[in-house]
Image (cartoon, coloured by chain):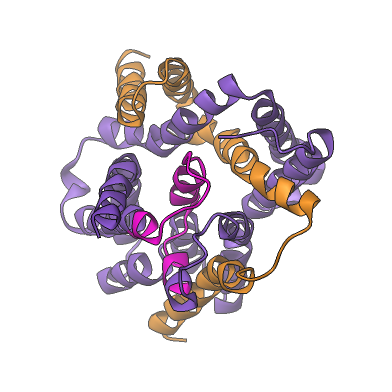
Chain colours: A orange, B purple
């Protein structure tokens, strides 16, 4: 199969799960329990997306720099600094840890 | 009119951290696909049409490993099924007057990052203009980053490239921590999600579960548990 067709198929199966709920759920009133569940999905997804994936974020064998960046991000986020500060702070933390360890 | 312009400005502003976070990941994608010998036009098409980081990385890896097209498409599908949950959650927040074709168009821009940024907005209803601006920032930076990775980044020092891997995680942490400080429901739900995800990642039975399924299961189970424990929709983000 040509690579272009493969990319098109991958694009299709990526797009459908994004599109169907938005188009189909337009005029449906969901039950209260489901609505409540949906409202918790952002927090659930954030937790699952961050951990344990973050431990491998700076490459295998670099657990110390990943942990440093993780801690810096948590501290900066705790003080509710701007997201960009959190992002650059964490990158700098990883960079310094990579230099010294 | 003025209100829509305001929403576009808000969207661009909310999209900036996402855009900054995407650049290094997209550069890494461009670099890796080039070093694996994938033709540049294929990597560029992937970022334009698939526009999903994890799937693109795994896609090129599977290609090199000689996986069949069926396996690659199936893995992509499973990996992105979590966007089904996110889109369903976001659907309840869209302004009612957004026509169906625009909904279908905005859906293309849903990623882990644009979803979390959008859904943690304080407004109950999300403007289409806001979402369009947010999605555009993210999409542009993903594609610009891919080009940079393909054509410029091979000269970047290794230590800088490795440090940038933390960027998106830092953004997620920056979004989550203020929420769990304010709401114990958010704390409990995200804590459960982490525990469930760790069980899949570290216990023997989890070795057969892909990353994509593990994130879907952890998200769904912990959100369902949250809805049982705190049915009164206590989290006003």
Instruction: Determine whether, in the image, residue A85 is placed left or right of residue A18.
Output: left
* Looking at the image, residue B131 lies above or below residue B22: below
Please tell me which residue is depicted at 42% across the width and 62% down the height of the picture. Answer: B109
Hey, which quadrant is residue B68 in on the image? bottom right
Q: Residue furthest bottom?
A: A1
Find the magenta span and give its range.
Answer: B104-132
- Taking the image as shown, residue B47 lies to the left or right of residue B56, namely left
One can see residue B136 in this view:
yes
Q: How many marks?
A: 0
User: Is residue A97 depicted above or below B214 in this figure?
Assistant: above
For the point 42% across and 20% down, the residue is A80
Left-right relation of A93 to B87: left
User: On screen, B72 above or below B11?
Assistant: below
Give the x, y percent position of residue B194: 67, 33
Q: Magenta includes B119? A: yes
Q: Is residue A25 left or right of residue B206?
A: left
Quadrant of the image occupied by residue B132: bottom left
Q: Position of residue A95 (x, y in %)?
A: 30, 23
Residue A61 visible somewhere in the drawing: no
Q: State the residue in front, B156 or B129.
A: B129
């Amino acid at each position: 199969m040509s690579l272009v067709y493969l990319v098109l198929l991958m694009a299709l199966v990526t797009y459908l799960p994004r599109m169907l709920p938005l188009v189909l759920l337009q005029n449906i009133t969901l039950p209260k329990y489901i609505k409540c569940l949906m409202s918790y999905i952002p927090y659930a997804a954030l937790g699952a997306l961050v951990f344990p994936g973050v431990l491998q974020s700076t490459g295998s064998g670099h657990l110390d720099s990943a942990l440093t960046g993780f801690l810096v991000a948590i501290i900066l986020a705790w003080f509710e600094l701007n997201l960009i500060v959190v992002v650059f702070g964490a990158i700098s933390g990883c960079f310094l840890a990579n230099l010294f360890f | 009119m003025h209100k829509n312009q305001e929403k576009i400005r808000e969207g661009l502003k909310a999209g900036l951290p996402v855009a900054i976070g995407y650049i290094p990941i997209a550069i890494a994608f461009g670099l890796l696909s080039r070093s694996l010998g994938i033709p540049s036009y294929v990597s560029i098409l992937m970022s334009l049409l698939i526009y999903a980081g994890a799937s693109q990385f795994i896609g090129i890896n599977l290609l090199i490993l000689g996986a069949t097209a069926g396996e690659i498409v199936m893995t992509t599908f499973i990996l992105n099924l979590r966007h089904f949950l996110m889109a369903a959650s976001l659907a309840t927040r869209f302004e009612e007057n957004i026509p169906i074709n625009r909904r279908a168009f905005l859906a293309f821009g849903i990623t882990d990052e644009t979803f979390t940024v959008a859904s943690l907005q304080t407004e109950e209803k999300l403007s289409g203009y806001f979402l369009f601006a947010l999605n555009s920032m993210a999409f542009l930076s993903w594609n610009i980053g891919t080009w940079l990775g393909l054509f410029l980044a091979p000269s970047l020092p290794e230590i800088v490239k490795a440090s940038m891997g933390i960027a998106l995680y830092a953004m997620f942490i920056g979004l989550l921590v203020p929420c769990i400080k304010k709401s114990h429901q958010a704390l409990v739900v995200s804590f459960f999600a982490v525990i469930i995800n760790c069980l899949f990642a570290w216990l023997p039975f989890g070795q057969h579960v892909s990353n994509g399924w593990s994130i879907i299961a952890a998200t769904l189970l912990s959100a369902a548990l949250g809805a049982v424990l705190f049915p009164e929709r206590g989290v006003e983000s």
